[in-house]
Image (cartoon, rainbow, N blue to C red):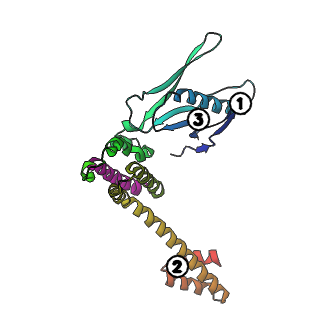
Amino acid sequence: MDTSLDQLRNEHLEMAGKIITDSIFRIGDMLYHIECQSTPDGTMAMRMFEYDIAIALEKAYKGKSPYCVKFPMSAVIYLRPDSSVKDFLSLQVYFPDGQALTYKVPVINVQEYSLDGIFDKQLWLFLPFYVMRYEKQLKQLKGIKNSRQAMKPMLNELQEMNIRLAECAEKNQKFDAYADLVNLIIKITNYLLNDKSTLKKEVRKIMGGKILELHSEKISKKVRAEERKSAISTLIITLKDLSIDQSKAVEQVMKKYSLTRSQAQAVVQANW
């Protein structure tokens, strides 16, 4: 967790024009290039090869002769369930001297991961897309009156997801990140549910609860702490302007804000 991480710009200029990649990260001393696809298409291997060449050449030009062209660690993430998605994308590269290389890019299919698998491997960013495995069923709900009963498995999994996320939030004290995840889950679920307002409300009720409350509570505590700090500072400055003795100012701060003597002395000294 303490390895340095930088998100790099995703625009690269080449002779044919500008190409835009999804995400490029530097983690430690390695470059990672990730593309995200909702559905597979026949050109993805070619596009990945094109992107990786642009990334590798840009890095190589920053070096000195003899140049070294090093490809990034790349992968494609597919969001929707599709049995045609393989473990790798590949293409053959033939050189004039007879050399032949196979360019391979790993493929990650989000829908192959169970809820347990996602939590065990801490693949938090897969969670917002988890409900896409129910997309086909959701499209078939038209005309079904008891949609809640039909989608009970999805709602149950969302409830379990919410409980486990709340536990992680409390354990790791990362309320901001987990609140962002919950908001993403709600946003993507709303997109999938489209005009199914009853189910939307149900999802919001399930997912908008504990974690968002925890996040809200944390923000409120931070605001209250800042307000308290500002009020103490204002009191001390006022006492100083009134030519009150510093020792008496300490007594005032102790009494008004229930601080120990050493705490009051430190804060008075800092603001005097």
Location of the C terminus by quadrant is bottom right
The tag on residue 26 is: none
Which secondary structure lies at badge 3? Answer: strand
Q: Position of residue 108 (x, y in %)?
A: 44, 34
**Which residue does the numbered mark 3 point to in the structure image?**
30
**Which residue does the numbered mark 1 point to in the structure image?**
15
211 horizontally vs 145: left or right: right
Q: Position of residue 159 (x, y in %)?
A: 31, 53
In magenta segment, residue 184: no
Q: Please say whether residue 27 is visible from this viewpoint.
A: no
Q: Position of residue 79 (x, y in %)?
A: 43, 39
The tag on residue 261 is: 2
Nearer mark to the viewer, of 3 and 2: 3
Nearer mark to the viewer, of 1 and 3: 1
Mark pair 1, 3: CA separation: 26 Å
Image marks 3 and 2: residues in contact by CB distance under 8 Å = no
Which secondary structure lies at badge 1? Answer: loop
Residue 117 lies in quadrant: top left
Disc 2 crowd rating (10 Å Cα; few below 14, some 14-19, many 20+) is: few
Disc 1 crowd rating (10 Å Cα; few below 14, some 14-19, many 20+) is: few
First to last magenta residue range: 151-173
Q: Earlier in the sequence, mark 1 or mark 3?
A: 1
For residue 48, above or below residue 250? above
- Identify which amino acid the numbered label 3 is placed on: Met
